[in-house]
Amino acid sequence: MDWFTAPGSWLTRLVLQRSLAALYFVAFLVAANQFRALLGERGLLPIPRFLAWAPFRRAPSLFHLHYSDRFFAFVAWTGAVLSAAIVAGAADLVPLWASMLLWLALWVLYLSIVNVGQLWYGFGWESLLLEAGFLAVFLGNSRTAPPVLVLWLFRWLVFRVEFGAGLIKLRGDPCWRDLTCLYYHHETQPMPGPLSWFFHHLPEPLHRAEVAGNHFAQLVLPFALFTPQPIASVAAGLIIVTQLWLVASGNFAWLNWLTIVIALAAIDGSRAAEVLPLPKPPALPAAPLWYEVLVLAFVAGVVVLSYWPARNLVSRGQMMNYSFNRFHLVNAYGAFGSINRIRTEIVVEGTDEQEITPDTVWREYEFKGKPGDPKRLPRQWAPYHLRLDWLMWFAGMSSIYAESWFLPFAAKLLHNDPPTIKLLRTNPFRGSPPTYVRARLYEYRFSGWRELRLTGAWWERTLIREYLPPITLRNLSSDANRP
């Protein structure tokens, strides 16, 4: 079928698939590096405990067949190796069916992790990566031209990501409607980056222009993705520019990078190939019949599943970052329907003194990404995802977010638990564990230009209250005591 494929989009597919595989590599690397402390057999939220009450139908995962920390590590590192292989071009060196199986394997492995990840994996970009990865299964490889309908499904995905985020803002916090949200957002976002301080100190008229530009990018440009070329390419290009702005202003794991990648599906690759000094691609053979039938069945399935997210977009009770099925296919997306006006941070401290007195010296634990020492400039971490740091941000807003894991976290610190300490930037008790641990809640605000010059401090902080009183191992339950 001549209408089935778009031979001129070979470059679009090449860049999209290789970039998507690179993000899969990051996701599996994050899982391999962090799971033992967060989800392992002796983690803060152990997977075996979760599997004991969550049946397969509720959380489809390979780990229902078997779980051990060694097996989880095998799954994560296998995903990383397969991802790296696809980045290097392995999927284009094998038959079409084998390429599809490679992508399907990535999806199954990461789905297995997400569905047992509990709070640590409750972010919208997990579903977005899974949905994009499943679409990539049906994009084919160099043995055939890219199927047009699958490229359009990528556009539909970008539309839901952008338009969903735009609608949730208009329906949510009034500051999005009066264009003042960015008076606060750069300062109060989950994990500021090295340029966030500078973005925060832009003049207020520029902040209002930022919000207006965001509304245009999320509420107008998504519709242009479905228009003829070159308009669709221009719209995708502008969406990419706005996502790069977000990359520069904060740390949102791979959310922005993944949005950039899937937006490439709307770029006219044939024109780009003409401009760039690239060799001409080989003639792509016609798609085999079995592949055409499979793709058409898949597209029909996506159309059916699209009913629920489409209805969600027009609903007054719009849900944000919601999966309508356990396989995270065709989801609802959105971000920052409300904006914090004040940044509250939990500062965790310990002491090795045997008794607490007014003169007790408390030493702070520093986290890798979240603000701590006022004189430390935030680092750029995205697309790498620091899961503990993100949950600390939520816990600072409300202790409800920390009920299931914060006391076990304190217990790990009291044991100097190596996997947990690995998640932190500094451990002030390397020789022996502390005798007491406590947590205090602070208000953090970016310093001004004058304060930065005089003190070298990027932040100013004010104590609000005690978050967790000083505790020892004797205060904790036997269950929380196990490192």
Image: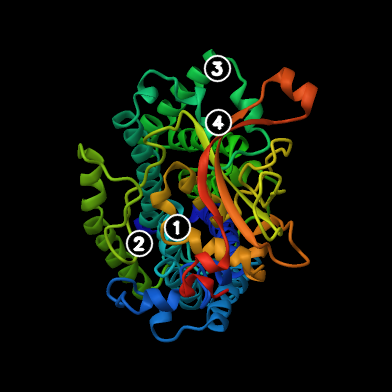
* Residue under numbered circle 2: 328
Q: Nearer the viewer, residue 295 or 25?
A: 25
Q: Identify the residue position indicated by label 4 in the image.
A: 186
Dots 2 and 4: beta carbons under 8 Å? no
Q: Position of residue 109 (x, y in %)?
A: 47, 73
Which quadrant of the rendered structure holds the N terminus? bottom left
Q: Residues within 10 Å of mark 1 (few under 14, many from 20)?
A: many
Nearest to N terminus: mark 2 or mark 1: 1
Residue at image coords 38%, 38%: 165
Q: Which residue is mark 3?
A: 206
Report which quarter residue 443 is drawn in.
Answer: top right
Q: What's the CA distance linking mark 1 and mark 4?
A: 23 Å
Q: Which is more N-terminal, label 3 or label 2?
A: 3
1 and 4 marks in contact (CB < 8 Å): no
Which one is in front in this view, the residue at disc 2 or the one at disc 4? 4
**In terms of sequence position, does the residue under pointer 2 or pointer 4 come before the other?**
4
Q: Tell me what residue is drawn at x 20 percent, y 40 percent.
A: 315
Give the Cα separation between the discs numbered 1 and 3. 32 Å
Q: Where's residue 171, x and y in %? A: 29, 31
Q: Earlier in the sequence, mark 1 or mark 4?
A: 1
Residue bearing the label numbered 1: 126
